[in-house]
Image: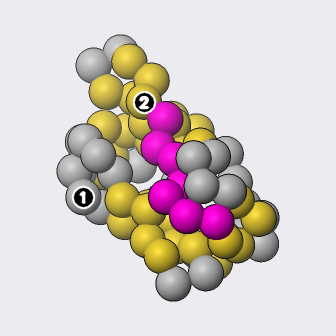
Amino acid sequence: MSAIETSMAGSVWKVLVKVGDRVEEGQDVVILESMKMEIPIAAESNGTVKEIKVNEGDFVNDGDVIVEIE
């Protein structure tokens, strides 16, 4: 199993995947908003979304796990 972590603190603006979706390395899965900028967070490997650990509007810190892929 692989975990996708945030690269900075911010608010979850949009979740682009749902449980069961197939994702490919480099595909954006979540968009964060920080200081009025939108920052895409991409999958680091191919797989299937097992769990989404955040909801739109949640605040996350640098290094938080937001999506798990298997």
Instruction: Report crowding for label 1: few under 14, some 14 to 19, many 20 or more residues within 10 A (C-alpha).
Output: few
Q: Quadrant of residue 39?
A: top left
Quadrant of the image for the C terminus?
Answer: bottom right
Where does the magenta region start and end? 40-46
Question: Would you say residue 56 is visible in this rendering?
Answer: no
The amino acid type found where label 1 is placed reads Gly
Residue 64 percent coordinates (x, y): 29, 61
Tag 1 secondary structure: loop
For disc 2, the marked residue is 39
Residue 65 covered by magenta stretch: no
**Is 45 or 56 nearer to us in this picture?**
45
Q: Quadrant of residue 22?
A: bottom right
- Using the image, determine if residue 65 lies above or below residue 30: below
For disc 1, the marked residue is 63
Q: Is residue 41 left or right of residue 20?
A: left
Q: Earlier in the sequence, mark 1 or mark 2?
A: 2
- Using the image, determine if residue 18 lies above or below residue 34: below
Residue 44 percent coordinates (x, y): 49, 58
Tag 2 secondary structure: strand
Residue plotted at (37% across, 38% down): 11
Q: Residue furthest right?
A: 21
Q: Quadrant of residue 37?
A: top left
**Is 14 or 6 nearer to us in this picture?**
6
The amino acid type found where label 2 is placed reads Ile
- Disc tally is 2
Residue plotted at (24% across, 58% down): 63
Cα distance between the residues tagged 1 and 2: 14 Å
